Structures are given as structure tokens and as C-alpha cells.
Amino acid sequence: MKTDEFFENVTNRVLTAIEEGTPPWVKPWATLSIPWPENPLTQKRYQGLNAFWLDINDMPYARNQWATFNQIRDAGGMVRKGEKGTHILRPIELKKAFNDAAEETEESRVLFTPYVVFNLAQADGLDHLKPVPREPKPVERRPDIDEAIARTGITILPDDNRCFYRPSTDTVHMVPFEFFEDAAKGYATTFHELGHATGSDKRLARDLTGTFKSHAYAGEELIAEMTSAFMCHHFGIDGLDRHHGAYLEGWAKMLRDDKKAILRAAGAAQKAFRHLVPEVA
């Protein structure tokens, strides 16, 4: 598979789901096993677009663990005959040195090449790597989440009827939690607005000037929503259900026009997640 074909496959999958009104990162339940795609053989989490893509593709499986064919074989397992792998991307950093009269400089460029991984549920002989099921966590106010939000240092102010981030004052505005259907949806909305706040010039310095229905606006909303999805997965809650037309229409148009927009959004959301929860990044 070529890299451009990978981007097109991911984008088409997301577009189809958006057009059906069901963004694929929104799950109707909170996961009880592993909330984030990981490779148990390297002890590393998958990142960015890879994490997003594997999380979409873990639906048929009971475990969110992935590895290459050779890694599974070297660990004493064997991918079952007829199982199909899932393509993800491996970043390759290329560096080139330049000499001029003033100084030596080095320029870096990151390229991506697709490779294949398998869910460990597609292999035999690796039962010792099965994750221990997690007990479901209550969706009432969670001290651990409240403390993590407080550690971001981002100011959150009460509002009577709206939730939004205001760049001019660098403040998040939230309606009271009791206005939400449950605390999980309140946290998901908070994470979304905190995702926007990471774009401030004093943090990750994204362009937050896009006007409504512009590609820049749609891209920033997608970054914030994916940041919220990453945060919800990390804390083991389900609160993502904002499927209203303004988001979906904007995302669909942007993704049709730019097949690599999903890669940039996922990368930016990964950086936002790392900024909000640096202790696990």
C-alpha cells in the first residue's frame, strides 16, 4: 500500500461515518480493557493518526493490542491463517546538512511509510499478554480528572448557557455540570474546550482565527474533538456525542478537499493531549 492510498482509505472511512452521522471515534460505551492502542511487546502506545486509526479498527476485537507479524512470531505467537492486518504509518526522519558561507545548518523532513500490524486477538499463543479487565468507573465527578484539569493551569469560568474557549482572554467557559446528561459528557465537553485552549500562543500556537465554515475553523474543531476523544479514552469514560450538522458538514467538506487533513488533525490532537496530560505522554 502506498502512503497516499493509506491517507485516502482513512479519510474515506471517516467521511462515510460522518455522512452517516456517526463519527468513528465516538463509541457508545466506555472501554473496560485497554483505552489506548498499544504494543505490549514494545511497551509503547501508538501515537497520533496511528492511535486514532487503530482505535477505529479495534471494534471486532476484545483487546486494543497490536504488533507486527514478526513481533508476534518472535514472542512465541502465530497470526492465524487468513487474518488480514491493518496498515498504519511509520515516520522516517530525513536530515540533510547544508553549508554556506555563514554557518552549517541541518534541515529535517519527516516522511511516512505504511506497514502492517495485527490485533493480538488475531494470533494464538499470546494469552499471557491479555490485558486485565478494568472495572467500569463511575461517571460522577471524578477527583482524578478534576485534578488533571486543574494541573493544566487553564482558567475555567462559569457560563449560564454556553461552552466555549475565548482566545482573547485565554479562558474556557463552561455551563454547570448538572446541565449535562451525565458527568461523562460534561468532561468530554470540557476536554474539547481545553483542546482549543492548547492552541493559544502561550501553548502550542495554532491558528485559531478561522471563521465559521472555513477549513481552518473545521480543522480546529476536529483537533479539539479528537483531543477530547484521546482524553476520554485515557480516563476511561464515554461522553462524546456531539454529532450536530455544523461540525459534520465542515469536517466532511474539509476532508474531501484535503486527504491529508486527518493526518494533521490527529498529530495536532496528539500534541494537545500531551500538553494537557504530560505525565503520560
Image (cartoon, rainbow, N blue to C red):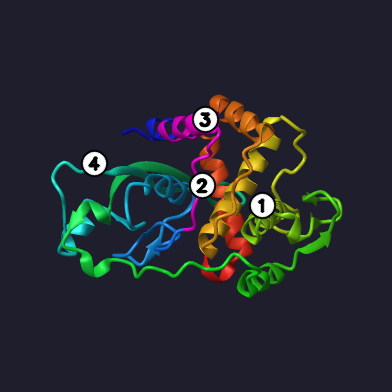
Label 3 belongs to which residue? 20
Query: What label does residue 192 carry, if any?
Result: 1
Q: Residue at x 54, y 48 (%)?
A: 267
Instruction: Calculate the distance from the C-alpha at mark 1 to the C-alpha at mark 2.
Output: 42 Å
Label 4 belongs to which residue? 84
> Could you say whether the residue bearing mark 3 is in a helix, strand or loop?
loop
| Magenta region includes residue 13 | yes
Foreground disc of the pair 1, 2: 1
Q: Where does residue 172 sit, x and y in percent of width and height?
A: 78, 56
Nearer the observer, 266 or 33: 33
Task: Please name the amino acid that badge 2 sits on.
Answer: Phe
Task: Please name the amino acid that badge 4 sits on.
Answer: Lys
Residues marked 4 and 3 touching at CB (< 8 Å) = no
Q: Is residue 76 above or below residue 61?
A: below
Left-right relation of 228 to 194: left
Q: Residues within 10 Å of mark 2 (few under 14, many from 20)?
A: few
Q: What range is drawn magenta here? A: 9-30
Choose the circle earlier in sequence order: 1 or 2. Answer: 2
Q: Where does residue 202 sit, x and y in percent of width and height?
A: 75, 58
Q: Where does residue 20 sit, x and y in percent of width and height?
A: 52, 30
